[in-house]
Amino acid sequence: NEANLLGKLMQGVVTNGTASALNGRGYTVAGKTGSAEFDENGSSHSWFVGYAHRDDKSDIAIAVIVEKAGVGSEYAVPIAKEVFDAYYNE
């Protein structure tokens, strides 16, 4: 179904795409990075939305937006990584 396909595509963003910094962390992550343009000069907000899973803990979902910071893979993904690491490694 569509939800399973979307999940697989979002996992691909982590395993082979713009959120690869979240790959191989001891938990499975699926997500999407992006940039939201906020002015006529092409400046943008950085964002990441996704979720993570590990068998021994509940899943966690996250949405990160960093205003005026550029692309998602450079600014929002490292923040998501810190949150996921804190949650799964507490």
Image (cartoon, rainbow, N blue to C red):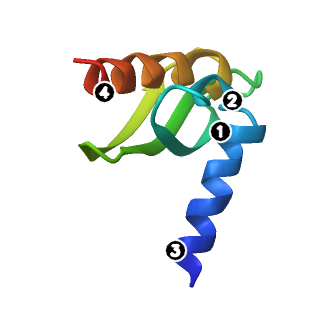
Find out whether the residues at labels 1 and 4 contact each other: C-beta distance under 8 Å: no
Residue 74 picture location, percent across and down: 65, 16
Question: Given contact means CB atoms under 8 Å apart, are the residues at marks 3 and 4 in contact?
Answer: no
- Mark 3 against mark 4, which lies toward the viewer? 4
Kindly identify the residue that appears in the image at 70 percent across and 40 percent down. 15
Q: In this view, does 17 lie above or below 59?
A: above
Considering the numbered disc 1 on the image, is that residue within a helix, a strand or a loop? Answer: helix
Mark 2 near mark 3, Cβ–Cβ under 8 Å?
no
Query: Which residue position holds label 2?
Result: 20
Q: Which amino acid does label 3 sit on?
A: Ala
Q: Answer with left or right where residue 19 lies relative to residue 54.
A: right
The quadrant of the picture occupied by the N terminus is bottom right
Residue 14's tag is 1
Q: Is residue 68 visible?
A: no
- Taking the image as shown, residue 1 lies to the left or right of residue 61, namely right
Tag 4 residue: 88
Q: Do the residues labelled 2 and 1 touch (CB within 8 Å)?
A: yes
State the residue in front, 40 or 22. Answer: 22
Residue 87 location in percent, x, y? 27, 26
Quote the CA–CA distance across marks 3 and 1.
17 Å
Local secondary structure at mark 2: helix
* Quadrant of the rendered image containing residue 6: bottom right
Which one is earlier in the sequence, the residue at label 2 or at label 4?
2
Alpha carbons under labels 2 and 3: distance apart: 21 Å
Measured in 3D between alpha carbons, the distance from the residue under mark 1 to the one under mark 4, in whole angstroms, is: 17 Å
User: What numbered label is drawn on residue 3?
Assistant: 3
Left or right of residue 70: residue 85: left
Q: Which of 25 and 48 is in front in this view?
A: 25
Q: Which residue is drawn at 55% across and 45% down?
A: 31
- Tag 4: amino acid: Tyr
